[in-house]
Amino acid sequence: MNIQAEQILEVMAMYILPFARLSGFLMTMALIGSKNVSARFRLLFALSITALVAPTLPASPSIPLFGIQAALLVIEQTIIGVVMGFVSRLLLETFVIGAQIIAMQSGLGFASLVDPANGTNVPALGQFFLMMCTLLFVSFDGHLLMIRLVVESFYSVPVGNSPFSYEMFWQIVSWSRWIFATALVMALVSIASLLIVNISFGVMTRAAPQINVFAVGFPLTMVSGLILIWFTLNFFLPHFEAQMSRATELMCEMVALEC
């Protein structure tokens, strides 16, 4: 059997370029890209997916594997994967922002926990909403949907056969308005209700100045916030479904897929 070096390099290129996009995607994807998942697992997972899908993908361009052009292609594919995975991360962070708005308004922001995914202190309510989003994301097979989209992107945006477009960065910036809009809409009822509670405490202080408003108002505000959170949970699922649909549409638009 005569195997030439060029043939080995062609086989390596067939796997390395798709691996760059898939590894970049898994590096920033929700759940898998968090600090709770080891880098070794992400590497093995990316290698497994690459080994399964690479033989079915369009042929990679015939270029020298160890050269500037190949290095630029690897960087380009990694950036495409990172941008696509970042969308799924923004999907979950939407509800963390909404929870932080409610927590700060109701006084529950004092209870903070260390977020193991990001390594920062966040309100306990934000962690609660993040856990619910994660469970819904997995129960709706969101992780499988995201992986399917990044695999199908190899057909709409082939490796090396389509010019890299910086428009996807602007699409993410434009889509970020939905993050704050969804978070604000979800927390709007709580904000309005707690505003009325605070106004009532102001009227009570003017009517009876001898009442210690801090000793009475702070516990009542927290109890009101807990009750409002309970009512907010009834509308949590529709907000999540709508935001997940928008995130899926954004990923399809970035790689010119029909969803």
Image: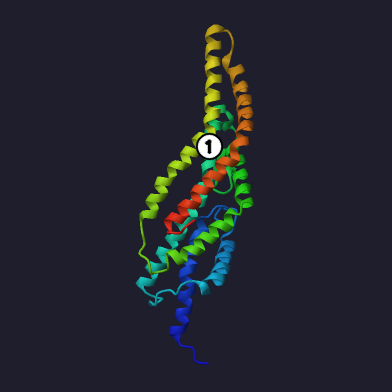
Pinpoint residue 93: horizontal percent, then vertical percent: 52, 44
Pinpoint residue 150: horizontal percent, then vertical percent: 50, 61
Q: How is the image coloured?
A: rainbow
Residue closest to the eye, 247 or 32: 247
In the image, taking residue 83 as reference, residue 186 lies left or right, namely right
Q: Quadrant of residue 141?
A: bottom right
Residue 77 visible in the picture: yes
Give the answer, above or below, for where 140 lies relative to 121: below
Give the answer, above or below, for where 246 lies relative to 65: above
Give the answer, above or below, for where 40 lies relative to 63: above
Q: Which residue is mark 1?
A: 98
In the image, taking residue 134 as reference, residue 150 lies left or right, namely left
Residue located 52% across and 9% down the image: 206
Q: Secondary structure at mark 1?
A: helix
Q: Quadrant of residue 231?
A: top right
- Amino acid of disc 1: Gly
Q: How many marks?
A: 1
Residue located 37% across and 50% down the image: 170
Residue located 55% across and 68% down the image: 47
Pinpoint residue 254: horizontal percent, then vertical percent: 42, 56
Q: Residues within 10 Å of mark 1 (few under 14, many from 20)?
A: many
Residue farthest toward the front in the current orientation of the protein = 258
